[in-house]
Image (tube, rainbow, N blue to C red):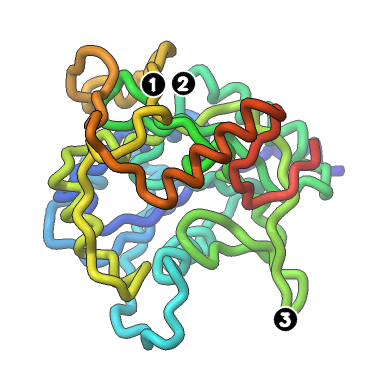
Amino acid sequence: MRSFVPMKISAFTFLRNAARLRFPFVESIRSALPLVDEFIIALGPCDDDTEEQLRAIGDPKIRIIPTTWNENLDGRWKVKGFIYGQQKSIALFNCTGDWALYLEGDEVLHEDDIPRIRAAMERHLDNRRVEALYFRYLHFYGNRNTIAYSPRWYRREVRAVRNNIPIWGPKGLFFSVVTSYKRMRYPRAAFADATIYHYGWVRPEEKMNEKWSGTIHHWSDKPYQPVTYTAIDSRVLQPFTGTHPKAIQDWLPPADGLFAADPHHVLTRRERKNRIMMWVEKITGWDTARKHFFPVD
């Protein structure tokens, strides 16, 4: 037991040209600062003012680590998103807290959840069975009033990991616990009783395409297909009825009503499969969304 020792919380992320690509990265970082003792940022080569905006936050908790992106990965060994995992892990490996909270540059915490996150970390600090904490997700789509909700849009994901075990991020989204030199597994995770507010799909469509056209080679060898926000199955779009975090309020553009999908959109094969999964969920009550963790609660 170490309850007499003050708990330390780190946060970490990785960024590159986040200002030019219109990520709400400043808002993301500000949303976590009341919770954490340090915020580690792996900052890749930028041709915009991302670094200047980071330094303008003016908080001594922030520590910037300049990094290099390996653009020369052999295509025969390309693992989808591996370079994202490299950058994420650089930041994680520089964290010094008992817990390390991961936020991507378009993810924001709600101020009402800060006490619950801290309580979950304190509650499980000495429980070695709990290796991570998972959060529920709200994926905003098209505007501030609309969320995308379906098995395709992950509903829960690990965003805090215990920082004294062999754990790393082999790709952008999830984490793996290293159990031997040859084996890894998903972490055992408890619920943080908190929500990640994901705003990446609220950014201007041209900025989403600028991002993906410049990074698709890290994920696929196929030609880039431009993103069109209205080209989506309308059944996955739902109204948001809650409140947005205070940190993101000024960043969000005004909007009226639900985002409108193209009524003539032809469902893709993936969307047709998604509809079947949604039907199964409705009939059985099962959650068919993929999870990158083993729930322990």
**Residue at 24% over, 46% down:** 55
What's the mark number on residue 181? 3
* Disc 1 residue crowd, few under 14, some 14–19, many 20+, Cα 10 Å: some
36 relative to 29 in the view: left or right = right
Q: Rounded to the nearest whole Å, what is the CA distance between mark 1 and mark 2?
A: 6 Å
Contact, mark 3 vs mark 2 (Cβ under 8 Å): no
Image quadrant in which the C terminus is located: top right
Q: Is residue 190 above or below residue 85?
A: above
Q: Residue at x 68, y 50 (%)?
A: 293
Query: Which residue shows up at 25% across the image and 40% down it?
Result: 231
Separation of marks 3 and 2 at Cα, in angstroms? 40 Å
Q: Given the image, on which type of amino acid does mark 3 rest?
A: Tyr
Q: Secondary structure at mark 2?
A: helix
Figure check: 255 above or below 129: above
Q: Position of residue 237 (x, y in %)?
A: 38, 26
Q: Residue 100 appears at what percent x and percent y?
A: 57, 48
Task: Tell which circle, 3 or 2, labels the residue nearer the N-terminal end.
Answer: 2
Amino acid type at circle 2 is: Glu
Q: Nearer the viewer, residue 262 or 170?
A: 262
Instruction: Say if mark 1 contacts mark 2, CB within 8 Å.
Output: yes
Quarter containing the N terminus: top right
Q: Earlier in the sequence, mark 1 or mark 3?
A: 3
Distance between mark 1 and mark 3 Cα atoms = 42 Å
Bin the neighbour count of mark 2 within 10 Å (Cα to Cα): few under 14, some 14-19, many 20 and up: some
Q: Position of residue 141 (x, y in %)?
A: 32, 32
Q: Which residue is mark 2?
A: 111
Q: Is residue 206 left or right of residue 270?
A: left
Q: Secondary structure at mark 3?
A: loop
Disc assigned to residue 245 = 1
- Can residue 52 be seen by looking at this rendering? no
